[in-house]
Amino acid sequence: MKVLLIIFIIAFSLGIPRFSQSQSNVTVVNFNQLEPNLHKENDTVYFINFWATWCIPCREELPTILKIWNKYSDKKFKMLLVSLDFPNQLENRLIPFINKYQIKPTVLLLDDTDQNRWINKVDPSWGGDIPFTLIYGKGFRQSFAHEFKFNVLDSIINKKLNKP
């Protein structure tokens, strides 16, 4: 018993992470930290989805998003999932959710309560409903305020990746 306690104390003092590898993808950011991810100018297609674990359409859309990730993650395609969950639920709700559904894309937890300031900066046509998806790249920018089905989202991403 003393050996286990000593191992625990050593591990804690060395700062060994308490979470699995997939959980290390969660970074808490404010909008100023998120914003550069909304305006990159290169030959990559960016998929940014605003969602929350408490949002039923977001949860229903998740299998589609993960299938898209699996299909295109080895292409010039970047996916960022921006959680609008409450920051105080990171450890007891968001991280368990990520682990349960084996979410591999990068997850950011947006901790910025001034939605009136940042929603219009994401997209002036966005009313704040989720799920909300921004797909952009060099020369195009589209936003979608609805849940995707796989064939529709796959068609959009495929066209953007294979444009002349």
Image (cartoon, rainbow, N blue to C red):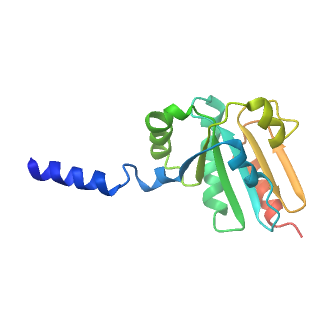
Q: Does any portion of residue 128 appear in the rendered image? A: no
State the residue at coordinates (67%, 35%).
112
Query: In the image as oriented, which residue stretches furthest toward the left?
Result: 1
Residue 10 quadrant: bottom left
State the residue at coordinates (47%, 42%).
95
Q: Position of residue 67 (x, y in %)?
A: 62, 53
Given residues 79 and 15, the one toward you in this image is: 15
Q: Position of residue 73 (x, y in %)?
A: 64, 63
Quadrant in which the C terminus appears: bottom right
Residue 83 quadrant: top right
Given residues 11 and 95, the one toward you in this image is: 11
Q: Does any portion of residue 23 appear in the rendered image? A: yes
Q: Position of residue 84 (x, y in %)?
A: 63, 35
Q: Position of residue 22 (x, y in %)?
A: 47, 53
Residue 114 quadrant: top right
Query: In the image as oriented, which residue stretches furthest toward the bottom?
Result: 164
Query: In the image as oriented, which residue stretches furthest toward the front?
Result: 13
Above or below, 108 against 59 in this view is: below
Q: Across the whole image, how many numbered discs are drawn on residues?
A: 0
